[in-house]
Amino acid sequence: MAHKFYGWLNLYLTPMWQEMARIGKKLVDHGLVESHFGNISVRQGNSMVITRSGCPLDEICEENVVEVPIHNTCEFDGLASSETRVHRRIYQETDAGCIVHGHCPFAVVMSLLDESGSIEPLDSEGVYFLGHVSIVEGSIGSEELAANSAAALAETNGVIVKSHGTISTGKTLDHAYINTTQIEHTCKVRYYYDLAKRSL
């Protein structure tokens, strides 16, 4: 049990922006998002801490995050990510503790190739941890995207936004990050499998 206690202790002792910075750098380093795209947020009671609009995810600092309420808009919304409305709706309608939005390339490609509305995993981890991955629609930061994402994420921990990227949730930032990587891995395997099958 000691390792679990240490994990929670570390979460409380580390300023939230530093945890967001750690995950943001991992997203960029592993090609899951370009530096100035994507966003990250963490639920804090009735508020959320979210990256600012245009914030480079591999250079997050204390000044690059902003706290806004979950249940209503505020004067700081203009500073926050363009996807604040989407994050807000997800927190309102799910028990998510954190949200990671990446622009994972294979997930984007598969969402453009798909005609069924979801990606069916072929890899064993994807089958076990994800099941089918829904593809939702809506323009960036729109009410349509907020509603579609929240509805889908009430049933799962990750979705793909058509032509845009992934939205993953979790109790912690690490959980949301892992869900992001799993969706991208599943889409990568699916892409190469379909490509190889067509060439046979």
Image: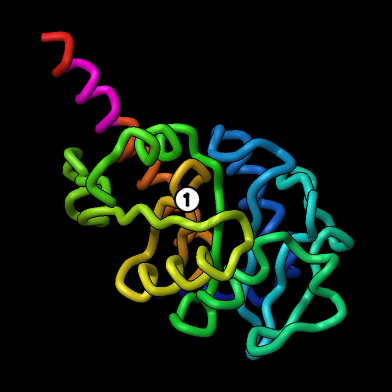
Q: Position of residue 176 (x, y in %)?
A: 48, 60
Q: Position of residue 103 (x, y in %)?
A: 55, 42
Q: Residue, x 50% and y 46% (percent of image)?
A: 165
The verdict on residue 185 being magenta is: no
In this orientation, which residue lies closer to the viewer: 130 or 29? Answer: 130
In this orientation, which residue lies closer to the viewer: 180 or 36? Answer: 36
The part of the image, by quadrant, that contains residue 128 is bottom left
Q: Position of residue 157 (x, y in %)?
A: 37, 64
Q: Residue, x 31% and y 56% (percent of image)?
A: 134
Q: Position of residue 94 (x, y in %)?
A: 44, 80
The verdict on residue 191 being magenta is: yes
In this orientation, which residue lies closer to the viewer: 68 or 147? Answer: 147
Q: Residue, x 79% and y 50% (percent of image)?
A: 55
Q: Identify whether 154 is placed above or below 112.
A: below
Q: How is the image coloured?
A: rainbow
Q: Residues within 10 Å of mark 1 (few under 14, many from 20)?
A: many
- Tell me, yes or no, if residue 73 can be seen here: yes
Q: Is residue 27 left or right of residue 52?
A: left
In this orientation, which residue lies closer to the viewer: 82 or 189? Answer: 82
The kind of residue tagged 1 is Thr
Q: Identify whether 57 is placed above or below 156.
A: above
- Tell me, yes or no, if residue 125 can be seen here: no
Residue denoted by label 1: 166
- The secondary structure that most of the magenta stretch takes on is helix
Query: Which span is picked out in magenta?
Result: 189-196
Q: Residue, x 33% and y 37% (percent of image)?
A: 187
The count of marks equals 1
Q: Is residue 104 left or right of residue 106?
A: right
Q: Identify whether 47 is placed above or below 29.
A: below
